[in-house]
Each structure stands twice: as C-alpha cells, then as structure tokens.
Amino acid sequence: MAKRGKLSKFAEEEQEERPIRFRRYEYLFLIVCEDQLTEPTYFEKYKAKIPEETIFLKSVGAGKDAKGVVKKALEEREKLAIEAKKEVDIVWVVFDKDDADENETKIKNFEDAFLLAENEKIEIAYSNEVFELWLLLHLVNVDKNTALPREQIYEMLQTQIRKTKKYDSYIYDHKKPNPKTIEIIFEIGNVDLAIKRAEILLENQKNNKPIEANPSTKVHLLIQQLYEWIEYYSFKS
C-alpha cells in the first residue's frame, strides 16, 4: 500500500495538471499586479470566500512598471478569453506610484498607464506610494494630511504587526518579502476597517492627480467590487 504522503502528493500533481473547466464559471475576474508575490498572494486569499463554480478569480504578478502592468493585463485578458472561450468580465490592474515622479520619462509612463487602461476598459487600483499602505490600513489608521514615504510605510507595517505578541520578532523587508505577511494581515487585520480608512484617504486626495495623491489607495474599490459579486452569487445560490 502506498504511503498517504505519496498519495497526497500524487493527487496534488494530478489536480495541477487537470485543465480548468471554465464553463462551470459564470464570471471571470482577472487581477494583474505590479508585484509578483505579495499582491497576487493577497488577492488569492479571497478565493476561499467565493461560492463554488461561480467566479473564476485569477491574480497574476507582472514584475513591471505601471504601464507594463497594463500591457501585461491586455495579454492576460486575451489569454484567459481564449482558454475560457468567452470574454473576461472584469480586469483590474494593481500598481504603485513608487518613484514614478522621479523624472519626465517615468511621469509619462505612469500617466500613459492610466490612458491605456481607460481606453481598454481596465480598472485601476493604484497606491501612492505603495501597496503596503493598503496592508497597513488593515491594522491602523494613518494621518490623511501627512505624506508617507514608502520606507515609513514599511516601518509602520512592521511596528503594527509586532504589537501582536507572537509576531513580536517579525521583520518586514521589501526586498525579501516575508511569505507569511499576507497570512498575518488576514489573521490580525480588518478589511472592513481598511476599506473605511482608504475611503477617507481617497476623499481627501480627490482634487489631486494619482501621482500627487500621497497617501491614498484604490485597492479598496477592487475589494468592494469583488465582495459585491461574491454576495450576489452567495444570494443566488
């Protein structure tokens, strides 16, 4: 008799190789992120909340700048449409301001990302300065009138996580992302409060361009829309 561990491994490999039966899904929800680890991992967590055979949620990491993320989204949308043999219902891109204001070339690329996304009917969830601001809002409010450099956001995120005793030695290193960060955020954070806090920041920056709107994020708009579809299909079923 084969050992349970080997049987389990075989089952996992078989499942990975098995083609996705897209006709089971009524709605295709595609998210293309700038980051290749932290951001996709965050959105993948929402799959557990989706009723079976309703929403196909796919999150992809691009590893590119804002404009590159939008271009990647166009490629992924076409690829998914071909695989599913139907149009993708909604596409979001997730990217940061980062150092987009460093020079004229970067400024243009950042602004072009918005124009391209608008022309292609792609929704944008940007953060100024970084996605970690959205994670931080799960844990604490921030001053809406004080700009937050990314290094300060990273430091604040680490500090807030360390306030939970079992994570008092947690280290946040942006260059070497901790794979447990997202799990911790979902364990000790509150997404409903994050949404409310993000709304306050965005409202305060409504007269500023995205490249100037520090601190702010639109990730909550993506999450709100995803929740609306989850609630719709939960009620429908």
Image: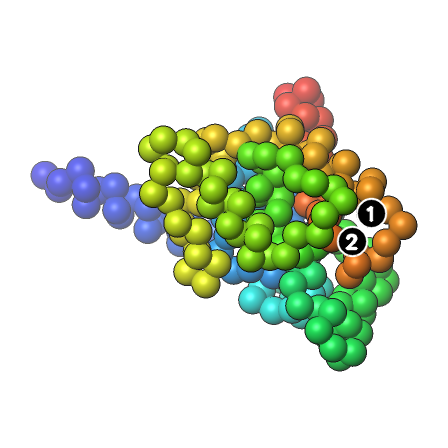
Q: Mark 2: which secondary structure?
A: loop
* Residue 169 is at least partly visible in this image: yes
Decide which of 164, 49 is in the foreground and name it: 164
Q: Give the left or right position of residue 39, taking residue 11 as reference.
A: right
Colouring: rainbow
As drawn, the residue found furthest toward the right would be 207
Vertical placement of 121 versus 140: above or below? below
Residue at the (71%, 68%) spot, across then down: 100
Q: Give the left or right position of residue 73, taking residue 12 as reference.
A: right
**Residue 176 location (% of width, % of height):** 41, 60
Residue at the (86%, 54%) spot, across then down: 208
Q: Are marks 2 and 1 in contact (CB under 8 Å)?
A: yes
Residue at the (53%, 45%) spot, across then down: 156
Vertical placement of 232 versus 47: above or below? above
Estimate how packed mark 1 is, as few (under 14), some (14 to 19) or many (20 or more) residues with alpha carbons within 10 Å. some
Residue 205: assigned label: 1
**Residue 35 location (% of width, % of height):** 56, 59
Please, what is the three-letter code of the amino acid marked with disc 1?
Gln
Q: Quadrant of the C terminus?
A: top right
